[in-house]
Amino acid sequence: MIKTIDFLNSIPLLIISVSAVITILVGSFYKKSTKYVYAVTLIALIAAIYYSFGYLDKEYLIYNNFLRVNNITTLFSIIALFAVLLSTLSAKAYIEKEEINFIEFYSLVLFSTAGMLIMIQSYNLITVFVGLELMSISFYILTGFLRKRIKSNESALKYFLLGAFMTGFLLFGISLIYGITGSMSYANIFQDTSVFKNPVFLIGSALFMIGFFFKMGLFPFHLWVPDVYEGAPTTITGLMSTAGKIAAVGTITPFIVYTASDNFRLIFSIIALLTMLIGNVTALAQSNIKRILAFSSIASAGYILVGVAAMNDLSIKSVSFYLLAYTLMQLGAFIIVSLIEKPAEGINEYRNVDIEDYKGLARTNPQLAIPLTIFLFSLGGIPPLAGFWGKYYLFYAAIQSNLIWLSISAILFSVISLYYYLKIVVYMWFNPPANGDVYKIDSMPSLSILIAAFLTFLFGIFPQYFFALFKTPFK
Amino acid sequence: MPDINTILFYIFAFLIVSFSFIVVFAKNIIYSAVSLFVTLFGTAALYILLRADFLAITQVMVYIGGILILLIFGIMMTTRITDSEIKTTNLSSVPAVFVSAGVFVILIIVLLTTKWNINPPVENDVTVNRIGNLLLTTYLLPFEIASVVLLIALMGAAMYARKK
């Protein structure tokens, strides 16, 4: 039975899901209430983050052991909520510009957030699955939210079909794990470590991981990423590439660190290597900034897998720090792209998203060019920005596990990535303006850009502030 | 002499596998859909052999009564609109054969070499009662989340379909 105390131990999840239901109810009765729904969404996200901090250094199993609250889950939840908050803050200006300012937007964002929290906190394979579906289906709908844009429809359909197909892998994996362990609860699965060597368990967990690797956009399941990220509304791309990835990584990393044996380390290292190769090298040839950022997010998933492949005490710490840094810089960049983008006429493609359009941006719009430069430098891993420390900790974790060849190649790919990040910076600062447009920036997007830029510097100069959050070490 | 359960199992298993082949390889999509009907019915029969009456009924109601009928209606509607026969073709069949055969061999080896936890079929009257109880007590949280998933799917469909 569900006990009353369970509700007190899952306040952020309750806040998010209740406000999601409230927004959809309010929206169906009062069509003109978008402004208030926006405010409710922001308040719900801030309150959820505030209450999440109360669960640090706590340990609960709630809802009949279906969810678990501890340092790891709370940490990933906070980062995911923060990513959703930053992107929602800036989303209103974009969806007003594109004339898709519907209430469903906010309730879908909140429902996907609830799915992320359920996924990250789940202590049972069933909740992993339903949480993932809740998040994914919201994302499929949000990807096609620009209903009149052919690109958006196409990418939603692609994402939906591939996602549904990969869900099959995930479910097959879950059923094999259930078949051999006789339970779906992590408590029973993790209990008997001898089963981890069993071939059925290995195949089951491999299929389970494939489902998540698809969501993370790792090689060879990355092909959907550039098309979907390019076709989705830009704020949604920012949300998917950060919060969606945080949820997938936050769910699968503890599972891998608990169950995976050394057999998997080599496979993960090879996948990480190929992901970094594909992401970074293909990005060199792109000219659409959304595609560049999509390939950069593939490459980032590769860096994250370097930390996961280490499978030691540092893995979760370094992965979570990188995710935070990645959220700040990737989301910051996407927010700026969404501000520069112009609404297209009719069913046409997105306008003003080619890097040619960024020429001379520093002269016409310095208030956009300066933060974009910061985010791109951070993505490239230049100190003293958060992205540098994120990569530093990941590669350090890999070196601790004797994956020196992987760390060296990761650093090499990181150097390659500087080329396409700096190309945009050079276009912005050293080229004559492509057009004299001065872009309108509302207060809310500029607030989220400011927060992201400030935190990029803060965690770049004082990364220890992040680790000071934890009094007890991870288990 | 194998008992009647085993004989029935092999009959249904043979039906399922052979009609699955027709589903995949039939050139006419209507043949595929009708073969899918036999496959899904066979699965329901397997559930009955396992004494899972609720699952069997759900399989018939949801897959045959719902999804398959929807599928056939969908095919009929679209052919009427476009006035063209829908043909099914397989792209890149050679790599697909290799991958599928590889997965098949691995799974067969693993299934044969593994010692499974086998529970003997329990002779109980109905499972609906116990499933209902479990869904509303132990499994309440996933059950509720699943209903939310349906809600947003509905919401998404309504949003895509509306005019403005």
Image: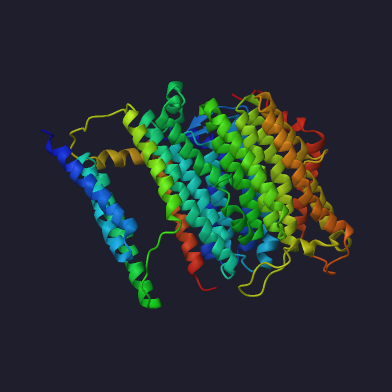
Image spot of residue A254 (x, y percent) = 56, 31
Which is nearer the eye, B80 or A250?
B80
Image spot of residue A266 (x, y percent) = 58, 31
Residue at the (82%, 35%) spot, across then down:
A461
Image spot of residue A90 (x, y percent) = 70, 56
- Relative to residue B14, is residue A240 drawn left or right? right
Residue A69 seen in render:
no
Image spot of residue A270 (x, y percent) = 60, 36
Residue at the (70%, 62%) spot, across then down:
A93
Which residue is outermost to the front?
Answer: B94
Which residue is outermost to the left?
Answer: B1
- Classify the position of the N terminus of chain A by image quarter: top left
Count of numbered circles on the image: 0
Relative to residue B100, is residue A469 depicted above or below?
A: above
Relative to residue A122, is residue A422 depicted above or below?
A: below
Residue A330 seen in render:
yes
Residue at the (21%, 46%) spot, across then down:
B12
- Relative to residue B109, is residue B5 drawn left or right? left
- Classify the position of the C terminus of chain A by image quarter: top right
Residue at the (63%, 49%) spot, across then down:
A241
- Relative to residue A179, is residue A120 drawn left or right? right
Q: Quadrant of residue A108?
A: bottom right
